[in-house]
Amino acid sequence: QVQLVESGGGLVQAGGSLRLSCAASGYTFSSRSMGWFRQAPRKEREFVAGLGGTGGIAYYADSVKGRFAISRDNAKNSVYLQMNSLKSEDTAVYYCAVDINHAFAIVTTPADYAYWGQGTQVTVSS
């Protein structure tokens, strides 16, 4: 079955950096679009970044554009989220998800993603 396992969250000061990892298994990783989402307390889950399958493009939410970078290593069945210049408003639980319906397109609606990881907490102190 499809499994996604995030890691790399933690506590960081504002202006600092973190790198999140998501290890995937149970499907052909290289041929499916991946997404990172986040959910802060009392807020809805929101799209952060997405990356198409091999050769696909990246797409970012305006709130993280220029600060975050999504990448993938198909040999390791992993997707990453490099987060720089972190702000207190980036504090949330971060989730990776796989869009099994798209190989290259990136969708931003959580309901379009069939499988999710358990999430990893990112806390940015000001």
Image (tube, rainbow, N blue to C red):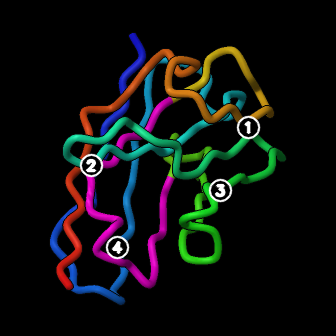
Residue 96: x %, y % from top left: 43, 39
Residue span colored magenta? 80-97
Camera-near label (1 vs 2) is: 2
What's the distance in space between the residues labelled 1 and 2, CA to CA?
28 Å
Circle 2 — which element? loop
Q: Which mark is residue 18?
A: 4
Earlier along the polypeptide chain: callout 3 or callout 4?
4
Which numbered disc, 2 or 3, marks the residue that appears first in the sequence?
Answer: 2
Q: Residue furthest top?
A: 1
Between residues 26 and 50, which one lies in front from this camera angle? 50
Of the residues tagged 1 and 4, which is closer to the observer? 4
Residue at point 37% right, 59% down?
Answer: 20
Residue type indicated by callout 2? Ala
Circle 1 crowding by C-alpha within 10 Å: few under 14, some 14–19, many from 20: many
- Magenta stretch containing residue 83, yes or no? yes
CA distance for labels 3 and 4:
17 Å
SS class of the residue under badge 3?
Answer: strand
- Find disc 3 in the rendering and name its residue: 60
Q: Of callouts 1 and 2, which one flags the residue occurring earlier in the amino acid sequence?
A: 2
The mark closer to the camera, 2 or 3, is: 2
Toward the right, the furthest residue is: 55
Mark-to-mark CA distance, 2 and 3? 18 Å
Amino acid carrying mark 1 in the image: Gly
Q: Nearer the viewer, mark 3 or mark 1?
A: 3
Quadrant of the rendering where the N terminus is positioned: top left
Question: Splitting the image into 4 quarters, where does residue 87 fall?
Answer: bottom left
**Label 2 neighbourhood size at 10 Å, few (<14), some (14-19), many (20+)?**
some
Q: Which residue is mark 2?
A: 40
